[in-house]
Image (cartoon, rainbow, N blue to C red):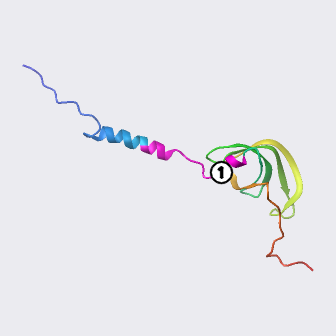
Amino acid sequence: PEITRPPLRSSCKRGRDFLGAQSTVAMAQASKKESILDLNKYVDQGVRVKFQGGREVQGILKGYDQLVNLVLDECVEYLRDPDDPYRITDDTRTLGMVVCRGTQVSLISPMDGTEEIANPFVAAEE
């Protein structure tokens, strides 16, 4: 007597292998994170970066990634007023080359063409 075995079944339903492979490739392409910002035009130029928590630094942007982690060279931190933690003073601290974690970055501003102006909403002191 001959033993017959049931045909082997794949874990995928019929016709789904090909579509599954296509959808996997499409999902992989869609899941690749693209950078929110195009910072290429600011590489090797001066930028000022503000962080969550109030710190501010200025330096030359050397590199970045899709998570907005930044590499700054010749970096200088602007120190805060000890009496008012929301006020930045003209006192600085030289840091050199630093890596700034993207989750803490709240603002990136180019230094070229940036100047401080008076706040029009503050009443003039007499």
Q: Residue drawn at (24%, 33%), measured in percent from left and top?
A: 9
Q: Residue furthest bottom?
A: 126
Give x and y (percent) for residue 67.
62, 47
Give x and y (percent) for residue 20.
35, 41
Q: Residue drawn at (37%, 38%), measured in percent from left and top?
A: 21
Q: Quadrant of residue 73?
A: top right
Q: Quadrant of residue 22?
A: top left
Q: Nearer the viewer, residue 29 or 104?
A: 29
Give the residues in magenta: 26-42
Number of residues whose C-alpha sits closer than 10 Å to that of mark 1, classed few (under 14), some (14–19) or many (20 or more): few
**Does 119 appear in magenta?**
no
Q: Secondary structure at mark 1?
A: helix
Residue 50 appears anywhere in the view: no
**Vertical placement of 122 versus 61: above or below?**
below
Tell me which amino acid carries mark 1: Thr
Give x and y (percent) for residue 5.
16, 27
Residue at mark 1: 103
In the displayed structure, does residue 21 sit left or right of residue 4? right
